[in-house]
Amino acid sequence: MEYIDLRSDTVSHPTVAMREAMAKARVGDDVYRDDPTVNQLEADAAEIFGMEAAVFVTSGTQGNLCALMSHCQRGDSIIVGDLSHIYEFEQGGMAQIGGILPRTVPVQADGTLCLDDIEKAIYPDDEHKPVTRLIGLENTHNAAGGMPISAAYTTAVAEFARNKGLILHIDGARIFNAAAAYGVDVKELAAGAHSVTFCLSKGLCAPAGSILMGSHDFIRRARRARKALGGSLRQAGILAAAGLIALHEMKDRLHEDHEHAMLLAEGLSEIPDINIESQNTNFVVFSLSQRAKLSVDAFVGSLRAEYNIFMSPYSRGEKHVRMRTHYWIDKKVIEKVVAAVSSVLS
């Protein structure tokens, strides 16, 4: 049955070229470091980001936790946004598994953290207090509606961290979307960071996997953390083959997803009872007006039952819905979605 899925870009599935590459992939045992396709993916990713080394991990969540466990000792504290994915949506792994204490500061509307707030969150050098070790940023910022974070801001935080003797980690799950939004090389968005993760899935369409990057010594420690977390894989080249296409081809078309998100927002904005709240990169957030006859749950349910269109309520706002465009959402699909939404609300 055909359907249209706008719940997330995580629902994107591999392209035909990826499936063919996966079927033909040269593989080996990655625990022994002899899978040539994984080795190539790691080397290429590190070069693209201007990092010394990289390691393939099963997910962004695993990559972030490997990073924190490699940078921090048990009992250390990190400064993160109160709406950051690493704090809100990764099951508290930093504390549960890593013994690391998060100290949160408010995420601004543009997805940034105020430097003054970061400075106030640093614990004093006091034997009664945890040691503040790291600052975590997110780019693009999920909870801020896909806001891209600029190179200028990241550079400022990196300089601040360096002056304070702190480590900077970037959860760059969608950092290639930020690069597309600003029209810059992704190296600029990672400059000054000690470590960066990015997802090969989501907008890049690979079926699974993420990359964690940093210095040679950091990646050596990260591999140990990955092992402890059960992330060491064997013939992972089957996944890495799709990752290579994601890295070298799919990242260069993300601007299309952004354009489609703009078209989707424009089309929906013309429908009575739809209020566009934000449109950034490949994210669209809208709300139903108070005049709307349907609740959000009924609205989403009707779209699914009548038109096979999948959306999800956005939990951070009453009567809000968040959508993400991806490779499998084109102009014809957008026309169908706008027509269906109009029909359901009429």
Image: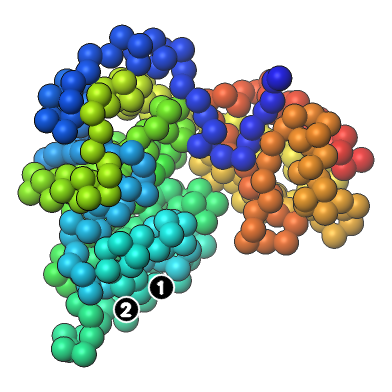
Q: Quadrant of the C terminus?
A: top right
Looking at the image, do the residues carrying marks 1 and 2 touch, with CB atoms under 8 Å apart? yes
187 w.r.t. 293: above or below: above
Secondary structure at badge 2 equals: helix
Answer left or right for 10 relative to 187: right
Residue beneath disc 1: 105
Q: Position of residue 22 (x, y in %)?
A: 35, 16
Disc 1 residue type (three-letter): Val
Observer able to see residue 40:
no
User: Residue 52: x and y, percent?
Assistant: 11, 40
* 254 horizontally vs 241: left or right: right
Query: What residue would you read off at disc 2?
Result: 121
Mark 1 or mark 2, earlier in chain: 1
The residue depicted at 16 percent of the width and 33 percent of the height is 31
Q: Residue at x 67, y 46 (%)?
A: 312
The image position of residue 32, as x and y in percent, is 11, 30
Task: State the CA–CA distance, disc 1 to disc 2.
Answer: 7 Å
